[in-house]
Image (cartoon, rainbow, N blue to C red):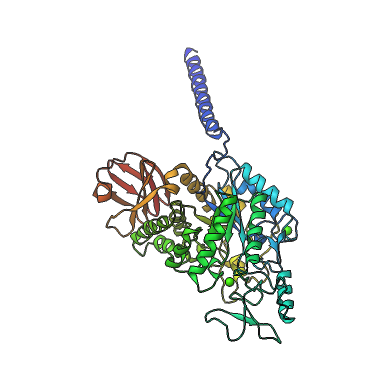
């Protein structure tokens, strides 16, 4: 009897201690979940940006075309306003592809700079989106096409009429760059106005005539457009085709952007401005006195990032390039930022160029663990694919976001990308899967955010002697961190004290790692898993 009683008592004790243990575990879990809701406090431009091709992102009106309210509805996905939630991508800026009235699906040919295209919504929708973003400390930049308009723009129709009537006193006579047959400049493309000896410049297509920036009224017009939207609350712009203002004449074009940006900074000193100069580095850096520009050589299949991520070339090619880019641009302007990216709406999606997703994850590391303000193209965070293919159409690079829910967003007109080549997962399935690429991006962005040195520090490339290991020592406000990568498919060990640039510096803490493997630091010896990156403090 006593034995039975003993057994009962011990059983009760075991059960109660188990219950206590469960309660403890539960308490700990609850603690983690109950980090205070906090809006991101940063107030500078060193932000992770997300490029939205508006017509393909999210459709709120159920016509299959993406719109501004669609973006509003998806804000919790992009940034839920709580840096501690762990349930949101956490991007700190949005680049919206052109949203002004236009006959095309891509809207790079504007017919009215003061009107939101009716398919995308209204100015009130834009204002609501901006206000919501600002509540969550997310900046919004608009894609502004300064160089050209649509050939349906009233300015162009009036210009053409003035030319046909040879009405030199007409206000619009000199609105577009026009020459006679004799005056045509080599390297530029023109189209003839039938019946008269007048050719208008149109380097992209005859549907996109180029404005004449020798005309002070045109300069004023384009300044007013930017002013209007800055006053409405946008944080800045992504400027399209900046080198085309005076195509082939870089000094004159740089002079234009110097003037334009100095005017805009009078209105908004902290304007976020990024220019698209799709050219070699020397030409891109020429514009850096005026504004930051995308680093095109980082992007695409053969770019500095994808090459390094594939592990076939020396990682030091990438690290030295980051260092060089930072020193060259900051020599032009003290607060210059590197704007790296993997792909955009004019490029084949990067995920399709890697044999496995682990390479994509490595590429994400090399894109986001960089100085400045890196960009993510919508859908990149779920590994979406899409390439021009034999149909040679950019529509395949701008396919509908794969939400996997009730959104009926459709692919743009003319797309031919086969469904069976696309990923078979969606935002919905990936958010529910802890090991998904989407959740990897969330973690990576959080790491970037946790260490302010990553975005703002001065990068020095490390000389390791290894092909697939290397990184940077990053200095910011008197503090040093190391960003170190292993791009190989094997775990590697490296004694940091062997690197000359690290001698005399004491590093004690492996602060974070992210990749296909894990990492540990024992003394000065770092063991780093395959396709993994670490932050050492
Ligand atoms: Ca719609
Ligand atoms: Ca031009």
Q: Quadrant of ligand 2?
A: bottom right
- Residue 340 seen by the camera: no
Q: Nearer the viewer, residue 204 or 472?
A: 204
Q: Vertical placement of 69 versus 524: above or below? A: below
Name which residue lies at 57% across and 83% down: 183
Image side of residue 337 versus residue 213, left or right: left
Q: Nearer the viewer, residue 417 or 457?
A: 457
Expressed as whole percent of the image width and height from the top left, the position of residue 330 reads 41, 55
- Residue 15 seen by the camera: yes
Q: Nearer the viewer, residue 500 or 172?
A: 172
Q: Vertical placement of 511 versus 391: above or below? A: above
Expressed as whole percent of the image width and height from the top left, the position of residue 25 reads 51, 30
Residue ranking furthest to the top:
2
Residue ranking furthest to the front:
169
Expressed as whole percent of the image width and height from the top left, the position of residue 389 reads 56, 73
Name which residue lies at 66% across and 73% down: 174
Q: How many badges with numbers are in the image?
A: 0
Expressed as whole percent of the image width and height from the top left, the position of residue 119 reads 74, 61
Q: Vertical placement of 25 versus 96: above or below? A: above
Image side of residue 144 versus residue 363, left or right: right
Q: Quadrant of residue 304?
A: bottom left
Name which residue lies at 40% across and 52% down: 532
Which quarter of the figure is the C terminus placed in? Answer: top left
Q: Vertical placement of 449 versus 347: above or below? A: above
């Amino acid at each position: 009897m006593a034995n039975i009683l003993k057994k009962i008592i011990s059983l009760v004790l075991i059960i109660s201690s188990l219950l206590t243990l469960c309660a403890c575990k539960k308490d700990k879990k609850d603690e983690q979940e109950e980090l205070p809701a906090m809006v991101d406090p940063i107030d500078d431009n060193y932000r992770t940006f997300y490029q939205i091709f508006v017509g393909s992102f999210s459709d709120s009106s159920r016509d299959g075309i993406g719109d501004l309210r669609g973006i509003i509805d998806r804000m919790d996905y992009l940034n839920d306003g709580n840096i501690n939630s762990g349930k949101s991508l956490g991007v700190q800026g949005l680049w919206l592809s052109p949203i002004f009235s236009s006959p095309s699906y891509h809207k790079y040919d504007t017919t009215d700079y003061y009107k939101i295209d009716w398919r995308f919504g209204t100015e009130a929708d834009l204002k609501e989106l901006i206000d919501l973003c600002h509540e969550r400390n997310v900046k919004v930049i608009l894609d502004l096409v300064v160089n050209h308009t649509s050939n349906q723009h009233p300015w162009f129709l009036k210009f053409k009429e003035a030319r046909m009537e040879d009405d030199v006193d007409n206000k619009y006579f000199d609105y577009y760059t026009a020459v006679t047959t004799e005056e045509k400049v080599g390297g530029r493309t023109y189209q003839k106005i039938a019946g008269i000896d007048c050719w208008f410049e149109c380097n992209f297509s005859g549907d996109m005539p180029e404005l004449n920036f020798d005309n002070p009224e045109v300069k004023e017009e384009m300044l007013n457009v930017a002013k209007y939207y800055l006053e409405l609350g946008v944080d800045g712009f992504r400027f399209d085709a900046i080198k085309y203002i005076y195509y082939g004449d870089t000094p004159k074009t740089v002079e234009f952007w110097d003037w334009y940006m100095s005017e805009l900074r009078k209105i908004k000193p902290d304007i976020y401005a990024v220019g698209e100069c799709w050219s070699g580095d020397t030409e891109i850096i020429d514009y850096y006195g005026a504004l930051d520009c995308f680093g095109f050589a980082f992007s695409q299949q053969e770019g500095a990032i994808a090459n390094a991520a594939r592990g076939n070339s020396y990682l030091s090619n990438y690290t030295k390039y980051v260092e060089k880019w930072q020193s060259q641009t900051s020599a032009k302007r003290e607060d210059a930022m590197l704007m790296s990216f993997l792909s955009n709406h004019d490029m084949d999606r990067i995920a399709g160029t890697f044999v496995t997703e682990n390479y994509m994850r490595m590429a994400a590391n090399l894109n986001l663990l960089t100085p400045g303000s890196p960009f993510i193209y919508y859908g990149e965070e779920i590994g979406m694919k899409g390439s021009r293919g034999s149909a040679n159409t950019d529509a395949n690079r701008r396919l509908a976001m794969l939400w996997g829910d009730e959104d009926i967003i459709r692919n743009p007109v003319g797309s031919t990308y086969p469904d069976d080549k696309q990923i078979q997962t969606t935002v919905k399935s990936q958010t529910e899967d802890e090991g998904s690429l989407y959740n990897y991006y969330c973690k990576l962005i959080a790491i970037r955010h946790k260490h302010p040195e990553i975005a703002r520090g001065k990068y020095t490339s490390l000389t390791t002697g290894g092909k697939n290991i290397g990184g940077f020592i990053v200095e910011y406000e008197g503090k040093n961190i190391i960003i170190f990568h292993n791009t190989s498919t094997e775990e590697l060990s490296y004694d940091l004290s062997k690197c000359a640039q690290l001698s005399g510096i004491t590093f004690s803490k492996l602060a974070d790692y992210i990749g296909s493997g894990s990492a540990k630091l024992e003394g000065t010896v770092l063991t780093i898993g395959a396709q993994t990156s670490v932050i050492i403090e």
